[in-house]
Image: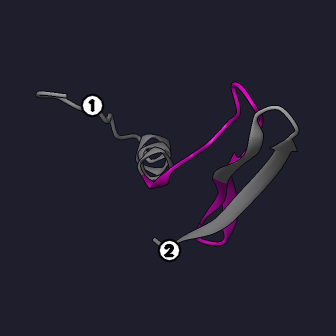
Amino acid sequence: MDIKIERLSDTHDCETCGPSWAEGARIYIDGALVLELDPHAHCYDGDNYDDEAIFRRILEHLGHTVAFVGAA
């Protein structure tokens, strides 16, 4: 199985809040696009996918359950 992660990014500049950015990814498995995590930079409620979120979505797509346990 070959997994390719193509990084995506988005920026937003607000006169009130200042600049913001978001990251995302397109995930290909064996050459086929299987997930598209579109980043949306915004003052509030943007969509950002860090490495942990990207890897979690890949594992879930492959049928695995991911749960964090223990102290925060």
Which is nearer the eye, 21 or 27?
Answer: 21
Res. 2 mark:
2
The magenta segment: 24-51
Q: Tag 1: Cα neighbours inside 10 Å, few (<14), some, or many (≥20)?
A: few
Quadrant location, the C terminus: top left
Q: Residue at x 41, y 49 (%)?
A: 52
Instruction: Give the vertical position of 57 relative to 29 (above or below).
Output: above
Label 1 SS: loop
Farthest residue in the left direction? 70
Q: Is residue 70 left or right of residue 5?
A: left
Please provide percent x and percent y for residue 68: 24, 32
Q: Position of residue 6 (x, y in %)?
A: 65, 68
Residue in front for this viewpoint, 16 or 28: 16
Which residue does the image show at 77% across and 35% down from the upper left?
A: 42
Residue at the image point whose x is 64% and y is 53% from the top: 23
Q: Give the percent coordinates (x, y) of residue 13.
A: 84, 46
